[in-house]
Amino acid sequence: MLRSLLASCACCLALACGPSQPDRNSSSRSTASAIDSDGTWVGKTSQDRAIEFVIKGGAVSSLKLGVRLKLDAVCARPGSPVATDYRGGEADVAYSTPVSISSGKFSLNAGVSDVDARVQGELSQGGAAGTIDLQATPASGCSGKDHLTWSAGRTAAK
């Protein structure tokens, strides 16, 4: 009788607790950490200009970026006799403190010839994509903003 009572209690306990449920957040955590991101990533912006960044040890260590910002009006750089309606060029930035990647996402800043560029990105198994927000620097004496998109793929592991 004692055996059947214990067996009944064990059965009830197993039914009441049920099978363990998977952690709903475990797949998102493992996906971000499962991406082999180290290496050189190369792609294009929505302006058809180059973007390239290097990831080492799970952090962005350098960025090369080409941008062109259409200004709100024709404007000359302080001290320059030449006025134009755009700013831009190429940035080649090596970060002394690499920019960390968290849950597959990163955000960093770069300066490109009188233009501030804020680059945001997200890595996935299929590549990387993100946005670039451009703004003329106050020191340029000009005004202008733009919002770009970009995509890239890893070309070489390091």
Image (tube, grey):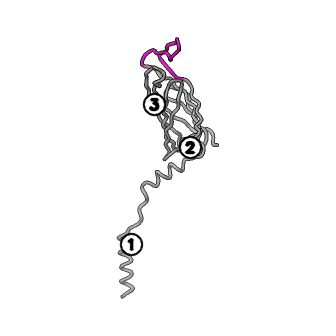
Residue 14's tag is 1
Q: Position of residue 42 (x, y in %)?
A: 58, 34
Task: Check the picture and name the quadrant holding the N terminus.
Answer: bottom left
**Mark 2 in CB contact with mark 1 (< 8 angstroms):** no
Front-lying residue, 124 or 136: 136
Secondary structure character of the magenta stretch overall:
strand
> Magenta stretch containing residue 84, yes or no?
yes
Q: How many marks?
A: 3
Which residue ends up furthest to the bottom in the rendered image?
1
Mark closest to the chain's N terminus, 2 or 1: 1
Which residue ends up furthest to the right in the rendered image?
158
- Highlighted magenta segment, given as a residue range: 72-88
Q: Which residue is mark 2?
A: 59
Q: Position of residue 33 (x, y in %)?
A: 53, 50
Mark closest to the chain's N terminus, 1 or 3: 1
Task: Check the picture and name the quadrant holding the C terminus.
Answer: top right
Q: Position of residue 36 (x, y in %)?
A: 57, 47
- Graded by Cα atoms within 10 Å as few (under 14), some (14 to 19) or many (20 or more), the crowding at tag 1 reads few
Q: Of discs 2 and 1, which sits in the foreground? A: 2
Residue 76 can be seen, yes or no: yes
Work out whether 35 lies above or below 152: below
Image-quadrant location for residue 11: bottom left
Amino acid marked by disc 3: Asp
Residue 41 can be seen, yes or no: no
Residue 133's tag is 3
Q: Report how far apart the C-alphas of labels 3 and 2 lie in the structure.
A: 21 Å
